């Protein structure tokens, strides 16, 4: 089972930054346990959302650079701090800014999650690039990428 923590990519500048959104809904099963009577969106899922957006973006950047497809795999979560709670009904805006991208080795992005302009979380994520051993997995990844960026505004 795969769960998506990014609903839509809204803004993309190849090699520079990406923005996307996640609409937090009360019908998410996580709120059955986290926490009954006081639903709070888990910080780990905020990190996951920032990582999903970043990883997809780094794979997109590598493709734009003409590199062979490789999977962006989260390897280090550094200095992530949570500043505010996220609850059902909130719309998170995720942003990832490329700090460095060595397309055959690794990449580092500065990430943040905001709600109504208020900072909820921020930090740095490090990615390594792994060979894709299953061609079917690459087809699924390509289809998801096309879907994710279909309505994104692309800026230079």
Image (cartoon, helix red, strand yellow):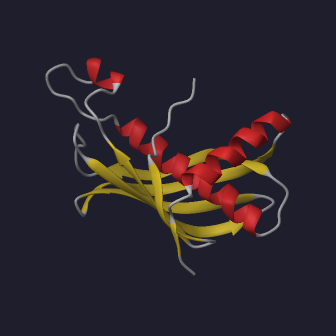
Q: Is residue 76 left or right of residue 9?
A: right
Residue 66 is situated, as x and y percent measured from the top left of the image, at 82, 67
Q: Is residue 80 left or right of residue 146?
A: left
User: Please, which residue is most extreme toward the left here?
Assistant: 37
Query: Which quadrant of the figure contains the N terminus?
Result: top right
Residue 43 is situated, as x and y percent measured from the top left of the image, at 36, 39
Query: Which quadrant of the figure contains the C terminus?
Result: bottom right
Query: Is 130 placed above or below 151 here?
Result: above
**Residue visible at 41% across and 37% down?**
45
Whether residue 33 appears in this view of the structure is no
Residue 117 is situated, as x and y percent measured from the top left of the image, at 24, 64
Query: Is 155 placed above or below 61 here?
Result: below
Whether residue 55 appears in this view of the structure is yes
Residue 139 is situated, as x and y percent measured from the top left of the image, at 76, 41
The foreground one among 2 and 49 is 2
**Residue visible at 47% across and 50% down?**
50
**Residue visible at 77% across and 42% down?**
138
Q: Is residue 105 left or right of residue 151?
A: right
- Number of numbered discs visible in the structure rendering: 0
């Amino acid at each position: 089972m795969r769960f998506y923590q990014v609903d839509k990519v809204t803004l993309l500048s190849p090699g520079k930054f990406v923005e996307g959104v996640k609409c937090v809904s009360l019908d998410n099963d996580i709120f059955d346990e986290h926490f009954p009577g006081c639903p709070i969106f888990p910080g780990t899922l905020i990190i996951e959302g920032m990582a999903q957006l970043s990883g997809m973006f780094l794979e997109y950047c590598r493709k734009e650079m003409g590199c062979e497809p490789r999977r962006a795999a989260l390897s280090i979560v550094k200095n992530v701090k949570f500043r505010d709670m996220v609850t059902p009904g909130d719309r998170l805006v995720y942003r990832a800014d490329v700090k460095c991208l060595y397309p055959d080795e690794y990449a580092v992005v500065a990430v943040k999650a905001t709600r109504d302009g208020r900072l909820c979380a921020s930090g740095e994520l490090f990615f390594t690039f792994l060979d894709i051993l299953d061609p079917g997995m690459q087809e699924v990844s390509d289809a998801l990428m096309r879907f994710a960026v279909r309505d994104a505004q692309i800026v230079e």
